[in-house]
Amino acid sequence: MTSAFQAVPIADNVDWVGAIDWSIRDFHGYLTDRGSSYNAFLVRSDKIALIDTVKGAFADELFARIASVVEPGEIDYIVANHAEFDHSGALARAIDLIKPEKVFTSARGVEALQQHLGSLPGLTAVGDGETIPLGDLSLTCVETRLCHWPESMVTYVPEQGVLFSQDIFGLHLASYERFDDQLPLELLDREAEKYFANILMPLSTFVGKGLDRLRDLNLAIKVLAPDHGPIRRTHIQRIVEQYARWAQQPRRNKAVVICDTMWGSSDLMARAVGEGLAAGGTQVRMMPVGKSGCHRSEIATEMLDAGGLVVAAPTLNNEIFPSLLDVLGYLKGLKPKGLLGAALGSFGWSGEAVKDLRDLLTDMKVELVDDDPIRARYVPDAAVLAQCRDLGTKLSAKLKAKFG
Ligand code: FEO
């Protein structure tokens, strides 16, 4: 009987044996509206190695795909490139089923896996740059610290030119198409950008160092196999160049305006700022938030290359409107660098929100261009809206001067 779940060859004696998650929509706060995949791989030579596992709930799918190629008990080694549960959740069950001779991971990976899963039989630290011989194929492990976690490493099969890059170069997309050239390039670009912005932006310095390390090794990569999304066999250079660019957080004359509103006043003020920005020649992304507005991870994606951030919100019960706190808390953690910005808003009785928003932006190291912040009591009149538009024009001029 043919198993429902089959392995997919990605190179000679190298197979994808991962799992497709069609349902996931929230990946620790990131809107994964196209689902995801947890990629795992088999490398078969005299010795057989399983590279990474999958999220715990998908262990049976992993085991079924493995069994379509080899008996799980024939596997000699497991390599754990990354300890996060989307790749290690099935590891304890995999060890139980396979009973591997060794489970290789980085030195920091030993500690991280034990902290997640308790003691694991066969757990073995592999040195940075160390090669594990399998026969006519081999595995070279290279540490890529903080891409994504401190223990992260990648594994390379030099004889086949296959790089298992764990989170690096991944994207969240559930699909039966396993390869990049089977999917629209625009879709790959957008989802890769979203992934970088939401997962790797705060670590962009380390991503840059990781890329330098891989470049220095002069790897002849023919197949780039990340732990999420399609495997690249065609657009490899494209994603490497995109990462090199994104790691610099290249900003341009573009502004993101985020707002929420109770009765329309802060929204009106935000739109007036947007008019001024656009009139000055800035590309503007108006991103209302709240229940029917933009998701925080879509805003984060736009922030990957925006030079400006404007926040408009009402004061609710002496506090910043909650939807803005959610988005700004998320953005602050992503550490966008070098932004210009402003905060403004409406109020009824007190109006603390604008000051608190400014403090939040200052904490994010945003350079504020509104020395005297605009606050409207209840409803902005024509004079206030004109000030808002002027603020947009002023910010636009500063963005142009800074980013061209
Ligand atoms: Fe896909 Fe950092 O885990």
Image (spheres, rainbow, N blue to C red):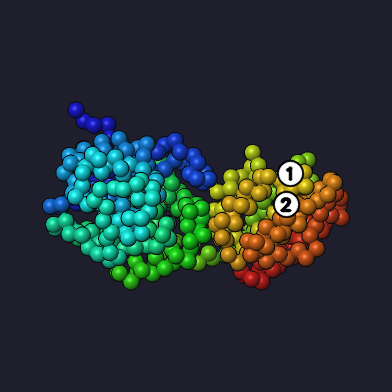
CA distance for labels 1 and 2: 8 Å
* Left or right for 375, reference 205: right
Q: Quadrant of the rendered structure where residue 19 is? A: top left
User: In the rendered structure, which disc, 1 or 2, sits on the residue that comes first in sequence?
Assistant: 1
Residue bearing the label numbered 1: 261
Amino acid bearing label 2: Ala
Does any portion of residue 13 appear in the rendered image? no
Residue situated in front as seen by the camera: 93 or 183: 93
Q: Nearer the viewer, residue 310 or 385?
A: 310
Circles 1 and 2: CB atoms closer than 8 Å: yes
The three-letter code of the residue at mark 1 reads: Thr
Left or right relative to 373: residue 63: left
In the image, 368 versus 2, the foreground residue is: 368
The picture places residue 394, in percent across and down from the top left corner, at: 74, 65
Give SS at disc 1. loop
- Name which quarter of the figure residue 57 lies in: top left
Residue at (81% x, 48% y) in the render: 347
The quadrant of the image that shows the C terminus is: bottom right
Is 134 placed left or right of 172 in the picture? left
**Does residue 128 lie above or below 72 as drawn?**
below
Give residue 286's position: percent from left, percent from top: 66, 50
- Residue on which disc 2 sits: 312
Q: Position of residue 44 (x, y in %)?
A: 18, 50
